[in-house]
Image (cartoon, rainbow, N blue to C red):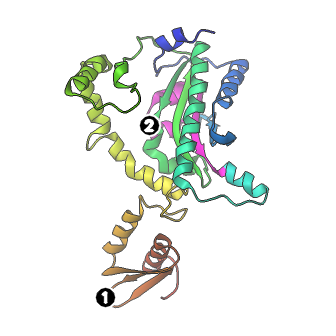
Amino acid sequence: MDLLPVLAQRRSVRRFKPVPIPEEDLDRLLFALQRAPTDASAQLYSVIRVKDPGLRDEIARLSGEQEHIRQAAEFFVLLADIHRLERLLAHRGQAMASWPRTALHFAILDAGLAGAYLALTAEALGYGVCFIGGVLNGIEALLDLLKLPPGVLPVAGLAVGVPDEEGPPRPRLPRELVVHEDQYRPYTEEDLERAYQAMAPYSRVGDWNRVLRRYFAQGGTMEERERPYGRAASRQGFDPDLPQGARFYSFGALLEEALAEARGVLFRPGEAWLEREAEAFRGEGKPAEALLTALRKARGEIPGWP
C-alpha cells in the first residue's frame, strides 16, 4: 500500500457519522497498535478502549466538552505504563530500579508511537482520527475514573470513526525549519516570519500567533495544565523527589505549602522538622517523605509526636 497519498491528505476529524467500525477493521487497528516500535521490547504503554457511553460522556466533559469523544465509533485513552513492567519483574523475583524520569520518557514515547500506528492504519482504511490532548485538562480526575494504578499516566485520547466532514489538510512548517543537518541551526528572524506565513492558513483569520498564544503563551492552556499534570505524575510515582502517592506538583510546592503553615522547616540527615511557635513535628526518611510526614502530623492527618 502506498501511504504517501494518505499522508498528503490527512487531517484531524472532529465530526463522525454514527456508524460502527466492523470487528475485522478494529482487529486491524489493534494489530497495528501492537506492531509499533518500542525500546528494549518493554512496550511501556497500554490503551483503554472506552465503550461505556456514560464513561465517554464524563471524559468528554473533563476534556472541555469535546463532542467527538462521544460521537466517534471508537475512543481510546493512550497510557504511559510502567506498572506492567514492574509486575513482570516481580513475577520473576526482581525489583524495579528507580528511574522515574527516564521511565516516563520512554513510556510516553511508546504510547505515542503505538497511537500513531493505529491512527495511520485507520486513515489508510478510510477512517478519520483525532488525537485529543484535552484529556489532560482533567488528568487528576481521570486517574480515578479509569482506576489507573501507580506507574500509569494518561498521554492522549484518540477518536476513530467514519468522517462526517471534509476539508483540506492542515499546513506544516517549511521543512528546513524542522530538519537540521549535523547540528542544530539557529533560527533567523526571516525563518520565524516564514514560519508564521506558512502556518497562517491554520487560523481562520490567517494569524497563527493567535493559536500559539492561546495554548503556549503565559496564561494559556498549557500553563493551566502544568500543575495538575505535575501533581498527577507525582501521585503515579514519576517524580524522583516525591514519594509515590504524594499529590504535589514538585518538592518545591510541598516545601512552599509546609512553610505557609509553619515558622520554619529544618532538615537533618534522615529527618525533617516542621516548627511552629509552640510545637514541632518530625518526619523520617528522604527529604520529601520526611517533610510530608511532618506536615501530615501538623495537620492532624496522622497521629504522633514528635
- Image quadrant occupied by the N terminus: top right
Position of 174 relative to 266 (above/below): above
3 vs 288, left or right, is right
Q: Which residue is mark 1?
A: 277
Question: Residues in magenta?
Answer: 55-83
Is tag 2's residue or tag 1's residue first in the polypeptide sequence? 2
117 vs 67, left or right, is right
**How far from the left and from the top, in percent, is residue 256?**
33, 68
**Label 1 SS:** loop
Position of 253 relative to 302 (above/below): above
Q: Which residue is mark 2?
A: 134
Instruction: Look at label 2 and name its amino acid.
Output: Gly
**How far from the left and from the top, in percent, is residue 300?**
46, 79
Farthest right residue in view: 92
Quadrant assignment, res 217: top left
Query: Is 65 one of the magenta-colored residues?
Result: yes
Please give the name of the residue rendered at 72% of the width and 21% of the height, measured from the top-left corner.
23
Quadrant assignment, res 38: top right
Please give the name of the residue rendered at 49% of the width and 53% of the height, measured from the top-left corner.
232
Query: Is 111 one of the magenta-colored residues?
Result: no
Please give the name of the residue rendered at 66% of the width and 24% of the height, measured from the top-left corner.
29
The crowding category of the residue bearing disc 2, from other C-alpha atoms within 10 Å (few below 14, some 14 to 19, many at least 20), is many
Position of 88 relative to 23 (above/below): below
Figure label count: 2
46 vs 8, left or right, is right
Regarding residue 172, the answer to whether it shows in the image is: no
Instruction: Look at label 1 and name its amino acid.
Output: Glu
